[in-house]
Structures are given as C-alpha cells and as structure tokens.
Amino acid sequence: IDSEHYTDGSIDLAHMSSESVDEDNLHISNSGSNGQFLSKQSGNSGGLTWADAGGGAWAVKASGTVSGGSALSITGISKTVKIILDQMATSASTFWKLTTSSDGGSSYDTGASDYHEEVWAFNAQSFSGNASGARAYRTLATNLVDLSQSNSFGRLEIDIPNPQLANFTHINSSYTCSQGDTNEVFLCWTAGGRESSADVDAVNIVTNDGTFSCSYIVLE
C-alpha cells in the first residue's frame, strides 16, 4: 500500500505512531530559535510562525564591569532593553549622558541636535525641573551629588522601549545616589529621547568629565 491508496482524511490518530510528527513535518513560515513559541499567523506560509513570547520575564543580554573607563557602549540592540548601572563611582563631580548609534556602534551621533529631555531632580535641600531640546546628547543624570567622594554610591536605570520605532526613540532613566559619609542623597528622573527616523541599535554612556567605574547588566 502506498500513498495512492489513501484518501484525504483517512489517517486517524489510532493509525499514527507516537512522535511521528516533528518540527520538520510542520509547515512553518520561518526557522525560529530556542525559546520562541509557535503562533498562528494566517497571512504567513503554512499559517504558523515561530515568535518571541510577549510579556515574559527579562532575559540577560549582557553584563560586566567598567573600571576607570571613559565610556560604556551597549551594542546589538534590536528590541526593548533595560540597562542598569550599579556601584557607580566617578573620578570627578560630573553628570551622565548618552548618545545613540544607527550603525551598530561604529559611530555615535554626538553632533546631532535632535535629542530632547525633561529632567526632575531633588535632594533634601532643593527640587528642580527643566526641559530642553535640540542638543547633541541625552542627559541621564545631573551632578548634585559628587560620586568621586569615598563611600559614595550610585545606581542608574535606563529604559529604551521599541528602539526601532520610526521618528522618535524613547529613552527614560532613573538615578539614585548617596554621597560619601554624609546624609546627602539625590534622586533624578529623566524622560525624552532621540527625534530621528534612524533605528537605534547601540548606545554609548559617558560622563561629562573624568572616568567612572560600575557594574552593569543589560536586560531584554
């Protein structure tokens, strides 16, 4: 008996052996990768497509340390990421800033004038808020607390949702720190981004003066 003796729908479950259907025998529109799930996509070939799970847990993209460095570059960005810098210390009183790249980190757009931001910062003595635009970088945190003093501590979180979004790339951050052996603490929140049609696929984090050290982790 060969295939010409079968009629459509004549093979029922009772006549199929266990584990007889595998991925290779399914009509799936793409090859997929580990960790993806099979989703229905009626417009695609075969109506099935491997896709990333939405709303799941963060996955670690990269991690490491910077010791006396002048910059931290995060490359290979293709979807929403969270960048966390911890145990931050600097060689001088300085503020933190970020620039973006659309060529994988080969160059960063420091000459652009289309970065925009709103900054809210306060400590025990003062509160400030301001908005600015058309500058050549994106401010992540101001320098109301001096992390160059001994026993100072800082933590910075940067969120970049949908970096491939056309016309505007959102870049939001929060910064907390305490200064030296005093009770001086500082909080800073910033919102804004890069107004450009180019997809952002890398970012560069620097201080305005001196060098810095930190541990970091990148989640996606």
Image (cartoon, grey):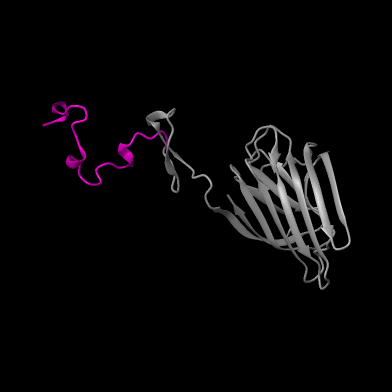
Q: x%, y% of residue 138?
A: 77, 45
Q: Residue 215: give x, y in percent of width and height.
A: 66, 62
Q: Is residue 2 left or right of residue 185?
A: left
Look at 21% across and 30% down and name the residue there.
Answer: 9
Q: Which residue, as the protein is rendered here, is positioned at the far right?
A: 125
In the drawing, does residue 25 fall left or right of residue 133? left
**Vertical placement of 113 versus 84: above or below?**
above
- The magenta-colored residue range is 1-30
**Picture coordinates of residue 184, whole percent (x, y):** 83, 67
Magenta-colored stretch includes residue 11: yes
* Camera-side residue of 151 and 124: 124
Tell whether 81 sits left or right of 119.
left
Q: Quadrant of the N terminus?
A: top left
> Residue 2: which quarter of the image?
top left
The answer to whether residue 159 is left or right of residue 119 is left
Residue at image location 19% in from the left, 34% down from the top: 11
**Residue 74 image offset from top left, x and y in percent:** 65, 49
Q: Magenta: predominant secondary structure element?
A: loop
Residue 67 makes an appearance in the image: no
Q: How many marks?
A: 0
| Residue for point 83% across, 62% down | 145
